[in-house]
Image (cartoon, rainbow, N blue to C red):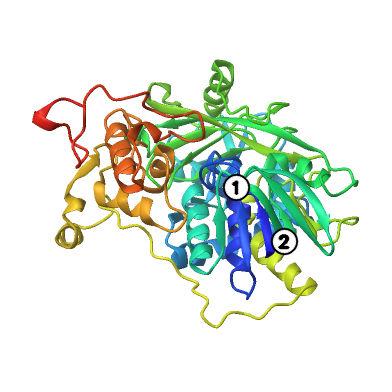
Amino acid sequence: MFDVIIIGGGVIGCSIARFLSRYDRKVCVLERSTDICEGTSKANSGIVHGGYDARTGSMKAKLNLRGSEMMEELSQRLSFAYKRNGSLVLLRRGQDEAGLRTLFDRGIANGVKDLRIIGQSEIREMEPNINEDVVKALYVHTGAIVDPFMLTAAMAENAAVNGVEFRLETEVKDIKKDGAGYVLVTGKGDISTKYVINAAGVYADRIHAMVSSTPMSIRAVRGQYCLFDKEVGDLVKHTLFQLPGEKGKGVLVTPTVHGNCMAGPTAEVTDDREGTNTTSEGLSYVLNTGAMSVLQIPGRKIITSFAGLRAKEAGGDFIIKFADDAGNFMDVAGIESPGLSAAPAIGEYVAQLMQEKDPAKEKSDFTDTRMGIPSVTLASDDERQKLIEHDPAFANVICRCELVTEAEIIEAIRRPVGARTVDAVKRRVRAGMGRCQGGFCSPKVVNILARELGVDPTEIKKANKGSEILAGLNKELDGSGSIPNGGDE
């Protein structure tokens, strides 16, 4: 019997888990995928928005601002990549300056600090590659970029260290009322709990409908992105937005915390809640629209493209409250942009609501920090030498593109809520994130996973069920994962 079950292991569910773990409660996160952060949270812009865009007084505006204010300190405590690079909202020749002024006024009303409207000369000084049609911009000093997955993983690991249980590959099929609490019917048996927190992303309305007759409508909106090689990672220094339209914030061009450049997303309403495929039309739109912000979009330097789904609720604002007709059931739904920016504040707010509803004692031994996985790429020469002296596996490079070693991959697997798939390793330590996109390192990652998990290599999956990489082996491997007699892999 749990005190709280959180449905959904994305950035919102993991943030809630982390903040709830401060209190003396038995908490569990249920996630239907093989890993955390497999849904909306894994495929987004990685932007920490300043908070100028959301309607003043809305839940989005309040939690965006608070989340942005929390993010830098949280990155230091939980050791994930964060960079305050600032952002620019661009006004092109022929556009109405009133739109830019509206964003400025709204940002001031929302409490955003250090906002300025700047002219052509200052824009070009800040961004030499800006499109010549850009004449003014809203400069948002507090804008930042973050690694979305590592933010999620860091909060999940910290929650797990503080006692939260994570059950992966556990899909909720139904929810039944049981006295003051609930019984969750899952593919792995029934689970009892006093409280349920619904953080199920694009499926939040379906989870809500299991217990409540109050209408909730979630539409999935697909966003397609292009990721460029690090060779052109300095195309822009700031995150470049275009004036928002009816479909949202539009196509942005931004650096990433890992030295790449990225453009996107599209905004395509879809009935397919699993529809994360890209299309030639969508990617062409990203490139053509992105070219309105910078002089030349380096289409020949794309190393991968991807798409994510965001959960758009009909009312247009975050829903964070206990359901009116279902006691002890809380919805945290409709968390579209700026959901990533607001995630820490959402976790904090949900923990406050829980304390108001059913106070629990704060733990005296709560651990609010987490050490990241050592990175050979980021280490100095002296630091690398010390890592290798501590563990020679830090000298065994597995991913050449991103300079990821065997020791880092092993650490990713052995951590709380650790990696169990090739994609899970990829997102934790970037093995396979580089120019060759895993062409060199994937077989080696499969062997390390199989060895560490004590399973046959044919059981190792790329991601979810059905994505097994190997159908069988045409040569026998020795116990170390190497092919005897110097054979080729």
Location of residue 76 with respect to 242 vertically, above or below: below
**Kind of element beneath mark 1:** loop
Residue reaching furthest to the left: 485
**Numbered-mark total:** 2
Residue nearest the viewer, comparing 154 with 317: 154
Which residue type carries mark 1? Glu
Location of residue 401 with respect to 210 vertically, above or below: above
Query: Which residue lies under the disc numbered 1?
Result: 31
The residue located at (84%, 63%) in the rendering is 179
Mark 2 or mark 1: whose residue is earlier in sequence: 1
**Kind of element beneath mark 2:** strand
Q: Position of 451 compared to 214: left or right?
A: left
Residue nearest the viewer, comparing 29 with 224: 29
Question: Where residue 462 sits: x, y (%)?
Answer: 43, 33
Which residue type carries mark 2? Thr
Location of residue 181 with respect to 40 vertically, above or below: below
Q: Tell me if I can see residue 135 in this picture.
A: yes
Disc marking residue 405: none
Query: Which residue lies under the disc numbered 2?
Result: 193
Residue reaching furthest to the bottom: 364
The residue located at (17%, 50%) in the rendering is 395
Residue reaching furthest to the top: 280
